Image (cartoon, rainbow, N blue to C red):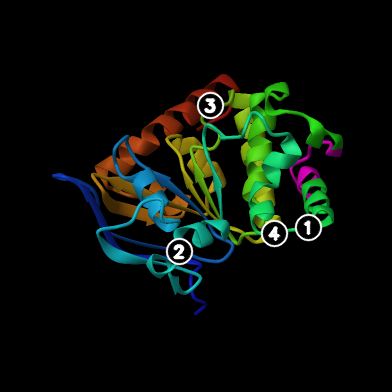
Amino acid sequence: MAEPRIAIDHVSKSYGAHRALDDVSLTVAAGEFVALVGASGSGKTTLLKTINRLISPDAGTVRIEGEDAGAQPPHLLRRRIGYVFQDIGLFPHLTVAENIAVTPKLLGWDKPRLAARVDELLDLVALPRDWGARFPAALSGGQRQRIGVARALATQPNIVLMDEPFGALDPLTRDALGEDYRALHERLGLSTVMVTHDMTEALLLADRIAVLAGGRLIAEGPPQALARSDDPQVADLLAAPRRQAARLAERLGGTA
């Protein structure tokens, strides 16, 4: 069996008396898209941030492509892992091209290589190449998030972490970006871990969904398996998508 790209093994994290993560184990295979879901405070973002050492666990290990993440300098580890934020985090004083090229520039890439990679990434996220000269303020929210995705992919990582990446966007833009990112994920053979509060988004995009509650992993599996779960907390998460699907089918004259 191939070694997973991400292996989280019995990870725990506490903040004073609060147990943010409690003995969580999870793997992510090459090419797999995993969504982390659960109520606010369930530990989703804390778990995500242990992968690239933005948070160090109190116990347990995280291995990235077979290597102990805790034994690697954090800044070097993070350069190997793409990260997409909800608030995007583009530098307003830098152009689109300069934002995309931040990490490659830190790695010492020369100007021709940087320029070629920026053009390649703008093509990849379906934006015109000449937009590289624009500043973030001139772009819509969806366009800025596409730049955020391009920046995360700049150094050709095998792993991309996404923290509520589309949560601030309008529904149409959110849906389109989700589909476009999923296509990129498959095209590039990425391993993606995405935190989302939107269960419908998780069901539509992820190969596997991990459900957290109170810092513990209470269920995980493909959408079809979770739909059959008798766990009441999983059922609660699925209730809204089921209601929406039933109402939509009724309004369109079909059946749920």
Category of crowding for the residue at label 4, using alpha-carbon neighbours closer than 10 angstroms: few (below 14), some (14–19), many (at least 20) = few
Marking on residue 73: 2
Q: Earlier in the sequence, mark 3 or mark 2?
A: 2
Q: Is residue 204 above or below residue 134?
A: below
Q: Residue furthest left?
A: 17
Q: Is residue 79 above or below residue 86?
A: below
Residue bounds of the magenta highlight:
120-129
Q: Label 2: state its secondary structure.
A: loop
Q: Is residue 228 at least partly visible in the picture?
A: no
Measured as percent of width and height from the top left, residue 64 is found at 47, 67
Q: Earlier in the sequence, mark 3 or mark 4?
A: 4
Q: Residue drawn 25% across and 57% down?
A: 12
**Is residue 124 in the magenta section?**
yes
- Which residue in the structure is indicated by mark 1? 110
- Which residue in the structure is indicated by mark 3? 168
Spatial separation of the CA atoms under disc 2 and disc 4: 18 Å
Kind of residue indicated by mark 4: Gly
Main SS of residues in magenta: helix
Q: Earlier in the sequence, mark 2 or mark 1?
A: 2
Spatial separation of the CA atoms under disc 2 and disc 1: 24 Å
Q: Earlier in the sequence, mark 1 or mark 3?
A: 1
Spatial separation of the CA atoms under disc 1 and disc 4: 6 Å
Spatial separation of the CA atoms under disc 3 and disc 4: 33 Å
Q: Is residue 180 above or below residue 78?
A: above
* Mark nearer the viewer, 2 or 4: 4
Q: Is residue 87 at least partly visible in the picture?
A: yes
- Which residue in the structure is indicated by mark 4? 108
Kind of residue indicated by mark 1: Asp
Spatial separation of the CA atoms under disc 3 and disc 2: 32 Å
